[in-house]
């Protein structure tokens, strides 16, 4: 793709803000490299038709950086739905996933599979460590301080590698097998798990009607558009159990008891099979 102008798109969803941080690092690095960049937060723009149209208009002369937090081993549904809607004109795509140190699941691999089956080439990928999004109320949140400067530097190296590859005569592609690093015996469990099933194991949310003012902030800020006001806030099947509604409620009227979860998450982290770190994936022989 040498001597061809490539438009870069950075598309992501970020209920807790950490995926947005990573997307910002990518956007700034691309901008510094002189690339044309279009960014979109799916949590704010549920109708992504405009971005899809702009990607289609490039006729494959584009590189999509597509990001998700890891929930219940997977990329979140809005991100996978966006990938499914991508035009078949091809182009390049770089999946990146943000995880809280317990397990990165199979998010990167399933994103890579879906992207390549739709005609995209994958010149790199990233797995970025971040504070676990469900532990913000804990005295010591899991992986607190991440993503930090070292994580940002790794993301910048990924972007540099991709930009260098796209400027070459023969951009290298990443083997998708590089993105599947879970124990084989765990794959069936991870593949069968869904966000909806995982949600049944998490603390239920209740509305404190004595303090709820029906202001609608929770509904406006819900990253999947899963809330509506029916006198009081209610949830629909699009909910991904990110608990952003708890974070943003100005009256703290949405409640969930996480007191029993702190020991659970710390036990999971202690028994984790993966090293809690940021990792970038680039083809063998590519510049890093």
Image (tube, helix red, strand yellow):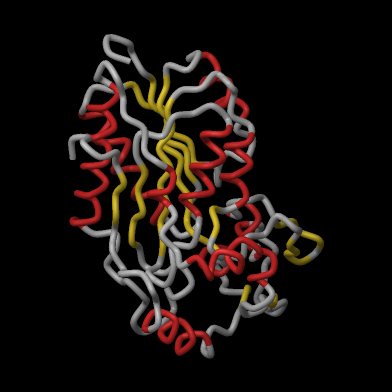
Q: Quadrant of residue 92?
A: top left
Q: Quadrant of residue 212?
A: bottom right
Left or right of 33: which side holds 188? right
- The residue located at (55%, 57%) in the rendering is 74
Rendering coords of residue 33 (x, y %): 21, 26
Residue extending furthest toward the right: 230
Q: Nearer the viewer, residue 3 or 139?
A: 3
Quadrant where the N terminus is found in the figure: top left
Q: Nearer the viewer, residue 132 or 90?
A: 90
Residue extending furthest toward the front: 184
- The residue located at (39%, 41%) in the rendering is 175
Rendering coords of residue 190 (x, y %): 58, 65
Residue extending furthest toward the top: 3
Report how many numbered discs are placed on residues in the image: 0
- The residue located at (25%, 40%) in the rendering is 284
143 relative to 164, above or below: below
- The residue located at (72%, 76%) in the rendering is 209
Rendering coords of residue 267 (x, y %): 43, 86
Q: Quadrant of residue 83?
A: top right
Rendering coords of residue 210 (x, y %): 70, 80
18 relative to 4, above or below: below
Quadrant where the C terminus is found in the figure: top left
260 relative to 232, above or below: below
Q: Nearer the viewer, residue 107 or 16?
A: 107
């Amino acid at each position: 793709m040498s001597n061809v102008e490539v438009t870069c798109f950075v598309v992501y969803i970020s209920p807790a803000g950490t995926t947005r941080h990573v997307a910002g690092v990518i956007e700034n690095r691309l901008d510094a490299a002189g690339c044309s960049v279009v960014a979109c937060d799916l949590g704010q723009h549920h109708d992504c038709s405009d971005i899809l149209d702009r990607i289609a208009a490039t006729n494959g002369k584009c590189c999509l950086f597509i990001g998700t937090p890891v929930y219940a081993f997977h990329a979140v549904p809005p991100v996978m739905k966006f990938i499914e809607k991508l035009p078949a004109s091809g182009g390049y795509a770089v999946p990146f996933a943000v995880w809280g140190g317990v397990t990165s699941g199979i998010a990167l691999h399933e994103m890579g599979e879906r992207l390549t089956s739709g005609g995209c080439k994958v010149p790199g990928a990233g797995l970025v460590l971040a504070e676990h999004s469900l532990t913000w109320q804990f005295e010591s949140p899991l992986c607190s301080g991440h993503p930090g400067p070292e994580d940002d530097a790794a993301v910048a190296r990924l972007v540099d590698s991709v930009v260098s590859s796209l400027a070459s005569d023969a951009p290298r592609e990443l083997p998708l097998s590089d993105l599947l690093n879970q124990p084989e015996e765990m794959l069936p469990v991870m593949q069968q798990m869904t966000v909806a099933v995982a949600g049944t194991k998490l603390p239920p949310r209740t509305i404190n009607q004595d303090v709820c003012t029906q202001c609608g902030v929770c509904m406006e800020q819900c990253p999947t558009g899963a809330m509506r006001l029916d006198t009081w806030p209610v949830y629909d099947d699009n909910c991904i159990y990110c608990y952003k509604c708890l974070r943003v409620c100005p009256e703290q009227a949405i409640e969930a008891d996480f007191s029993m979860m702190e020991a659970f998450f710390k036990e999971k982290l202690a028994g984790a099979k993966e090293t809690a770190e940021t990792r970038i994936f680039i083809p063998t022989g590519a510049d890093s």
